[in-house]
Amino acid sequence: MQKTPFSLYQQEAPSLRFSPKQGPGYLYDVLILGGGFSGISAALEAAKAGLTVAVIEGFEIGNGGSGRNGGHLLPDWPTDFSKLAKHLTPEEADAAFAIGMDTVALAKKRIAEYDIACDLKLGYVHCAYHDGHVRDLEDMQRDYEARGISGLTYLADKHALQTHLGTEAYVAGLYEEGAGHINPLKYLQGLAKAAAAEGADIFQNQLVEDITISQNEAPHELHCQTGDRFLGRHLLICGNGYIQKKAPKKMQRTLANVTSSILATEPLSDNLIKTLMPTGVAAADGNTALNYYRIDAQGRMIFGGRASYLIPDDPAVIGTDLRRRMLSVFPELETVETAHIWSGRIGITASRVPEFGTLGRGCYFVQGFSGHGVALSGMAGKILADHITETSDAFQTLTKIRHLPFPGGPLRTPILALGMAYYKLRDKLRL
Ligand SMILES: Cc1cc2nc3c(=O)[nH]c(=O)nc-3n(C[C@H](O)[C@H](O)[C@H](O)COP(=O)(O)OP(=O)(O)OC[C@H]3O[C@@H](n4cnc5c(N)ncnc54)[C@H](O)[C@@H]3O)c2cc1C
């Protein structure tokens, strides 16, 4: 795995240093591969429960999607809930729905409990370009309200939208008061410090080369490029879109990677901020290759979009495309300079439902948040830890969801790219 260029957040954040109490060769109760939201969240909960825990991260905490995403903090699952529910009994489906809706509450609780300064701002607008998107928003509002979820306001036309977004780009929107945005790396670093304070050992720059999953009483093992070997009674594999070929084959079959990219502008003037996004919401449209954006605490437009299965283009091409997308929503930004561009890998499953699974006795994984993991992966880590401490049956429920493999071999990328081209065409044709 290559070290990928830094996100804006990584460029600005201080590096974290940890002082693990144990080290290679020590038998931990829980060994975790990956220092993103999933792995760190699992470490926090397992350490709080009194277990000895080690997180093994190949680079620095936040090297993966968790340190380079759009920062949109959304409840719920990444896809139409019926895709999960069809695998579950009505009671299990109700429990799964509640898990999705509790994800932002968990993040907010942790931000308050550990006093994490991560620029949390609530308020979100889901935007419709056309009637097809409007129907999706109506369905979403109806489904939420049928389950007793409030806090959604339909913005029926351009005039209603103008309260939050100074743009002519959309025909309608849905305001969600319980969603919002954060600086994701500040949040992750806060969680990592909390996990370390609870007793978890966090090891950075320990790239795992080989995973030995034990099928008997012997410990699971992670063998690192440094030559160090870490041991655990339980093993959680939380490498998601960044682990790639090092993942056990079972995980590789059901996960594909999409590259998404983000542009940050120079700080905008107060007047421009009041014109473009006066209430400080985050927003996204309903396209498959969607645009997602927010203005951060430093007044910069953080505008994400593009979705590609192919090798990332050169930054100039990405920058031009992202600017084109941004100016189609906010032409007023024509004279504002781009300050930073970065990309990240999104792990997706065929159904866009994250996959929870078992690989052997005491070895579990989660992957495939499909671009919707800022809040959900934190909950997923807790679900993994709760399964080990036997304090919840959510893991067993979620492993009932079946996941289809992606096509294998050399045709995998071209087939996926073709599929994405089809959806981009649908976006263009407004279907
Ligand atoms: C550009 C982009 C924008 C996004 N925007 C949003 C958004 O606005 N809202 C939202 O909800 N979701 C968003 N997402 C998705 C979200 O970021 C992810 O779902 C979430 O961060 C997943 O967390 P994770 O811990 O499972 O994986 P990751 O954060 O990817 O963590 C995996 C970690 O495992 C480590 N690792 C992998 N292999 C090894 C190895 N061999 N040895 C050691 N360590 C290893 C990696 O270095 C990495 O740190 C976005 C993702 C991207 C890429």
Image: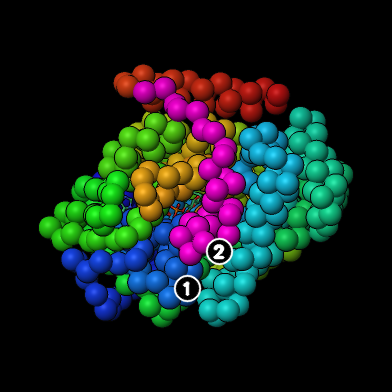
**Colouring scheme, one of rainbow, by chain, secondary structure, one colour:** rainbow
Vertically, is 310 above or below 76? Answer: above
Amino acid type, label 1: Ala
Q: Which residue is drawn at 53% across and 79% down?
A: 114
Vertically, is 297 above or below 84? Answer: below
Vertically, is 43 above or below 368? Answer: below
Residue where numbered disc 1 is placed: 49
* Relative image position of residue 245 (x, y in whole percent): 29, 38
Viewer-proximal residue, 284 or 253?
253
Q: In which quarter of the image is residue 55?
A: bottom left
Viewer-proximal residue, 359 or 144?
359
Q: Quadrant of residue 148?
A: bottom right
Pick whichever of labels 2 and 1 is earlier in the sequence.
1
Q: Does the residue labelled 1 lie within 8 Å of ligand 1?
A: no
The segment highlighted magenta reads 380-408
Amino acid type, label 2: Thr
Q: Which residue is drawn at 74% across and 42% down?
A: 90
